[in-house]
Amino acid sequence: MAKKTVASLQKGEGRTYSKVIKCVKSAKTGAYTFQESMVPNEAVKDALK
């Protein structure tokens, strides 16, 4: 029953942000790390450049 209550409270545009995960190579060690950020949906393509 809790899921119905939570679902009924969500109104409006829905999700306006996306989680972007990029793989970045470290210049110091050469190892790859993952960089996570929350970005507005309109700026996802710019964040991945």
Image (cartoon, helix red, strand yellow):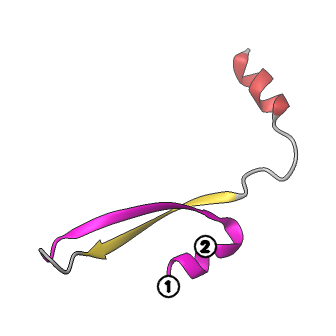
The residue labelled by disc 1 is 49
The residue labelled by disc 2 is 44
Residue 27, percent from left and from top: 19, 81
Q: Residue furthest top?
A: 1
Q: Which residue is pictured at 16% across the width and 71% down the height? A: 31
Instruction: Tell me: 26 left or right of 46.
Output: left
Q: Please name the amino acid that badge 2 sits on.
A: Val
Q: Residue furthest right?
A: 12
> Helix, strand or loop at disc 1?
loop
Sequence-wise, the earlier of marks 2 and 1 is: 2
Say if the magenta span includes residue 38.
yes
User: Dot 2 surroundings within 10 Å: few (below 14), some, or many (20 or more)?
Assistant: some
Instruction: Tell me: 27 left or right of 22.
Output: left
Residue 29, label in figure: none
Q: Which residue is pictured at 78% across the width and 23% down the height? A: 4
Residue 23, quarter of the rendered image: bottom left
> Helix, strand or loop at disc 2?
helix
Q: Please name the amino acid that badge 1 sits on.
A: Lys
Residue 19, quarter of the rendered image: bottom right
- Part of the protein shown in magenta: 30-49
Say if the magenta span includes residue 34.
yes
Q: Residue furthest bottom?
A: 49
Instruction: Tell me: 22 left or right of 1.
Output: left
Q: Which residue is pictured at 83% across the width and 31% down the height? A: 9
User: Dot 1 surroundings within 10 Å: few (below 14), some, or many (20 or more)?
Assistant: few
Determine the CA span between mark 2 and mark 1. Answer: 9 Å
Image quarter of the N terminus: top right
The foreground one among 22 and 5 is: 22
Q: Is residue 32 above or below residue 36?
A: below
Residue 43, quarter of the rendered image: bottom right
Instruction: Tell me: 24 left or right of 31.
Output: right
